[in-house]
Image (cartoon, rainbow, N blue to C red):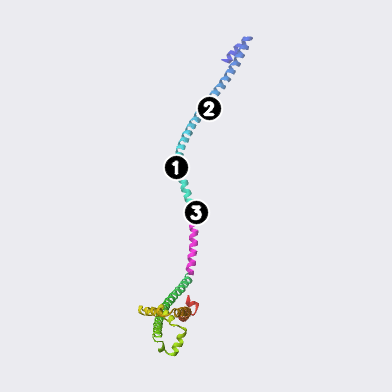
Amino acid sequence: LRLENFRKAYVGGGAGAIQIARNLELERAIEEMAKKVKASHNQYVEEKLLMQREQANLQQTLAHADRLKSEVDRLQPEHKRLKAAAREANRLRHDSHKWRFKAAEAEETLCDMVLEKPAEDQKLDNATNLLRHAIAECSTNSDNAKSLEEKFKQKTNKAKEIRKLGSSAARLISDISRLCPDSLPADLRARLNGMPLDELLQMASSEGGDSDDDSFEFETEEAAQPPEAAADEEETSRKNDESKEVKNDQLLADLELSYSEDEQEEKDAYEPETEEEKM
């Protein structure tokens, strides 16, 4: 049709041909434009389809993300529990290493103790024997101490008896000297010169005590004496008291010294000879 129109326009010539040429150019331009529009439309459709697919993919991705988020929320407690379990496992692993090291040390110590046990047993036996020996020595020393105590009591009782006998003898001598002074032997009177009758009476009264009758007779006799004789006797009694105190102190000192020497001899007799026996 275009060729026919071009032929008619060419045959007709003039302005009609120019118009036809312009129309042809416009048609070609319109066709090209239509092609471009169609291509653009096709591209738009493709891009729209692509966008729809991308949107669908995005929605799927969002839905998947929501599912993943819910799954993460659901697994969060389990994750915390697993983390705590992992920390506990690490702690237990560390403790197991530590206790394994301690077990190895204890095993070495036990082996050393097993090797040292015979020597320790020997030391224990020696200590036990020493303890038994010390107990036996203590028992022996206790028996010796009891024996010494009994002997000391016997000597004390004997000293008391001697003192009582001395008191009785002094009382008897004072009575004899007072009642019949001429009947005493000369040597006894010479020995009694340093010990007047008043001193003998005081010794007798301090040791055993005089009877009421003797005391009464002595006081009556003193009352019957004159004042000068009483003064002389008082002075003599004072001097005799002083000499009696000195003699009594000397006698007690000698007696204590004798007791201490006897005790020391008995202790030396029972004392262990070596330091090992003392232990």
Magenta: main secondary structure equals helix
In the rendered structure, which amino acid carries the disc numbered 2? Glu
State if disc 3 and disc 2 touch (CB < 8 Å).
Answer: no
Would you call the spot at circle 3 few (<14 residues within 10 Å), some (14-19), or many (20 or more)?
few
The answer to whether residue 151 is visible is no
- First in residue order: circle 1 vs circle 3: 1
Q: Is residue 184 above or below residue 7?
A: below
Of callouts 2 and 1, which one flags the residue occurring earlier in the amino acid sequence?
2
| SS at mark 2 in the image | helix
Q: Residue at x 48, y 33 (%)?
A: 62
Magenta stretch bounds: 93-116
Image spot of residue 86 (x, y percent): 47, 48
Q: Which residue is mark 2?
A: 47
In front of the other: 206 or 35: 206
Q: For the view shown, which residue lies furthest in the right direction?
A: 14
Q: Quadrant of residue 38?
A: top right
- Residue occupied by mark 1: 77
